[in-house]
Amino acid sequence: MTNIVLGDAMRNKVHSSFWLMLGLLLVIPLWAHHSITAEFDTSKSFTVKGTLTKIEWVNPHAYIYLDAKDDKGIVTAYSLETGPPGNLRRAGVLRTMFNVGDAVTIEAFVAKDGTQHLGLVKSIHFADGHTIVIGKDPKDLEKVNKGE
């Protein structure tokens, strides 16, 4: 049997390599995050009217689900993405503003890949006349959403 003795220089290399690899593994999820314009076409939008069926207020993005009924009574389910809950909260948009069963009209950006019934929320208009606007600048949105 041969005994291997690592010198200080070799031990430092192994130690540094370990921390480098650990750091790289921890940042991999950050590389997967996408910009809004990678997934949605912000030059094209659609409007859908229906009833809220589910609200998922989770990171990294909150989702609003809606059932829309056409003239023939056929129901189509929509999945609509918003920003992160923290950003929404800072902009004055709270989870308590939405209730399953609310009748709404939603304006949303279309998915770039052509996925039907998927969108990025621009604004939500409620039956009672109030509107929640969702967008990029939290300071501007806070003013809009507080009625200023």
Image (tube, rainbow, N blue to C red):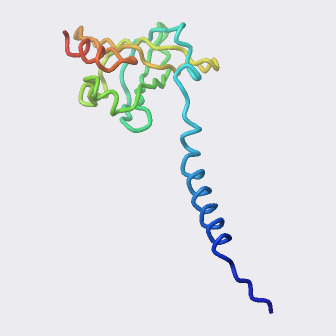
The image shows residue 137 at horizontal and vertical percentages of 36, 18
Q: Residue at x 37, y 13 (%)?
A: 123
- Count of marks overlaid on the render: 0
Q: Identify the image quadrant of residue 49.
A: top left
Q: Residue furthest bottom?
A: 1
The spot of residue 27 in percent (x, y) is: 55, 46
Q: Quadrant of the C terminus?
A: top left
Q: In the displayed orientation, state which residue is furthest to the right.
A: 1
Residue 27 in the image: above or below residue 119: below
127 or 91, nearer to the observer: 91
**Which residue is located at x 61 percent, y 63 percent?**
18
Q: Quadrant of the N terminus?
A: bottom right
Q: Is residue 67 left or right of residue 86?
A: right
Q: Nearer the viewer, residue 29 or 96?
A: 29
| Left or right of 80 in this view: 92 | left
Relative vertical location of residue 91 with respect to residue 123 in this rendering, above or below:
below
Residue 108 image offset from top left, x and y in percent: 46, 14
Front position in the image: 127 or 28: 28
Residue at 24% from the left image edge and 11% from the top image edge: 130
Query: Could you say where residue 129 lies in the image, as x and y percent from the top left?
Result: 24, 8
- Residue 12 location, quadrant: bottom right
The residue lying at 38 percent from left, 31 percent from top is 54
